[in-house]
Amino acid sequence: TATSENENITGMKSNIINHLELAAEDIIRNKMSGVSMAYWEMQMAMEKILKVYLMQRGEKNPYNHKITEMVNTSKNKFQMEIDDNLFKNIPSDKEAIQYRYGEIPGTTPQYAFGVYTNILQIIKAYTEQLKRKLTMNNASLKIAHPPWMDVN
C-alpha cells in the first residue's frame, strides 16, 4: 500500500520480494556459489527499500549500491530510527559485488541466514515508515470460494 509517485518507485518496490525469495533459495541450496549469490540478492532487496524510502521523501537516486550513505541520509536528514547493530554483519556494497562475481568465497549457509534475518528486520523497519494513502490496521480478510462454486 506504499505510495508510488513515479515508475521508479513502483518498479523498485515490486521487486524487493523477488530478491528476498532468490536469496532464500540460494542459501538453502547449501552450495558455496549459491550462498555467494544470496549476498547480492539480499543487497539488492535492501538497496531497493532504502531507495524507495528516500525517493518518497524527494531524494534523487544517485546512491548506486551505497547502503551506508542511504542509511546515513535516512537517519540524519529524515530522522529514521534503526538499530545500528542490524548492519554489523551486512557485507559492504563492494563485498556484495565481489560475492556476485565469485571474487570472494561465500560463507556458511548458517551465517548467510543470520545476514538474511537482519536484512528482513531492516526492510521491515523501512517498510513501516513508507508513506501510504491506504492503511489497514487490524484488518482481517477471509478468502474463500463463493457459495455458488462447487469445489468438491
Image (cartoon, rainbow, N blue to C red):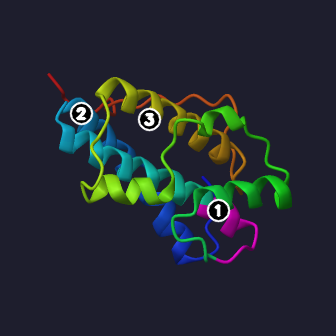
> Neighbour class for label 2 at 10 Å: few (<14), some, many (≥20)?
few
Name the chief secondary structure element in magenta.
Answer: helix
Marks 3 and 2: in contact by CB < 8 Å? Answer: no
Horizontal relation, residue 116 to residue 147: left or right: right
- Residue extending furthest toward the front: 104
Q: Which tag, 2 or 1, sits closer to the chain's start?
A: 1
The residue closer to the viewer here, 57 or 32, is 32
Between disc 3 and disc 1, the foreground one is: 3
> Neighbour class for label 3 at 10 Å: few (<14), some, many (≥20)?
many
- Amino acid at the residue labelled 3: Tyr
Q: Residue at x 62, y 34 (%)?
A: 86
Residue 56 in percent (x, y) is at 70, 66
- Dot 2: what SS? loop
- Amino acid at the residue labelled 2: Met
Label 3 vs label 1: CA separation?
26 Å
Residue 101 in percent (x, y) is at 26, 60
Residue 85 in percent (x, y) is at 66, 32
Label 2 vs label 3: CA separation?
41 Å
Label ID, residue 149: 2
The residue closer to the viewer here, 150 or 136, is 136
Q: Is residue 105 magenta?
A: no
Label ID, residue 3: 1
